Image (cartoon, rainbow, N blue to C red):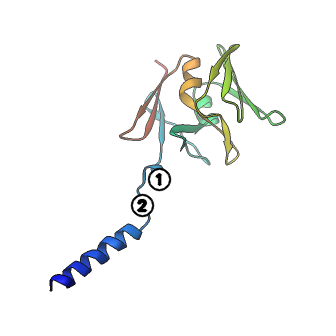
Amino acid sequence: MKKKILAIMLAVVLAVAAMPLSLSAYDRSITVTINGNAVYFPDQQPIIVDGRTLVPVRGVFESLGFGIEWQDSTRTVFLANAYHAVIIRIGNSIFVTNGVTYGLDVPARLIGERTMLPLRAVLESVGVAVDWCGYTWTVLIRTY
């Protein structure tokens, strides 16, 4: 009887160990809010790359009132509003805001035909506050 219980327990442990972890940290969805309002990303969701959250540029910056221009020949995105001009080149670990050069921990990249970048450095360069809530996996953007 003891051997039978041990065999059943061993079979259960092996079965559980063989299952894929569908609830791993990287399967969770990331939410982005601006002043408490959720940002909608229709075709490419935010992702985590090398420990950094990359977010589609268009969804966030259009919500913040920036115009966006893409130059395919140089793989460069230009963001501008009345106060700030930002230049970000795909694959480059630096970007320029109002003529000042800043660094990125993870370079901007194209994923699913969308320009993805780590938001904190870029948003802080234009005076916008960014926080991360690890409990809810939410990027919190505040403009006030």
Task: Using the image as rendered, state which of residue 79 and residue 18 is in the foreground.
Answer: 18
Residue wearing tag 2: 21
Q: From the viewer's perspective, is the residue at label 1 or at label 2 nearer?
A: 2
Q: Quadrant of residue 49?
A: top right
Task: Using the image as rendered, state which of residue 61 and residue 119 is in the foreground.
Answer: 119
Q: Single out the residue that lies furthest toward the left.
A: 1
Residue in view at x 64 percent, y 35 percent: 58
Q: Are marks 1 and 2 in contact (CB under 8 Å)?
A: yes
The amino acid sitting under disc 2 is: Leu
Residue wearing tag 1: 27
Q: Position of residue 124 (x, y in %)?
A: 54, 20
Q: Position of residue 29 (x, y in %)?
A: 47, 48
Q: Position of residue 79 (x, y in %)?
A: 69, 25
Q: Determine whether the residue tagged by mark 2 lies in a helix, strand or loop.
A: loop
Task: Using the image as rendered, state which of residue 13 and residue 47 is in the foreground.
Answer: 13
Residue in view at x 31 percent, y 77 percent: 11
The amino acid sitting under disc 1 is: Asp
- Tell me if mark 2 has few (under 14), some (14-19) or many (20+) residues whose alpha carbon lies within 10 angstroms of its own: few
Left or right of 68, for residue 40: left
Q: Quadrant of residue 5?
A: bottom left
Left or right of 113, for residue 132: left
Q: Position of residue 33 (x, y in %)?
A: 47, 34
Left or right of 105, for residue 31: left
Which of pointers 1 and 2 lies earlier in the amino acid sequence? 2
Q: Which mark is residue 4?
A: none
Q: Determine whether the residue tagged by mark 1 lies in a helix, strand or loop.
A: helix
Does 95 sit above or below residue 28? above
Q: Quadrant of residue 98?
A: top right
- Quadrant in which the N terminus appears: bottom left
Does 22 sit above or below residue 66? below
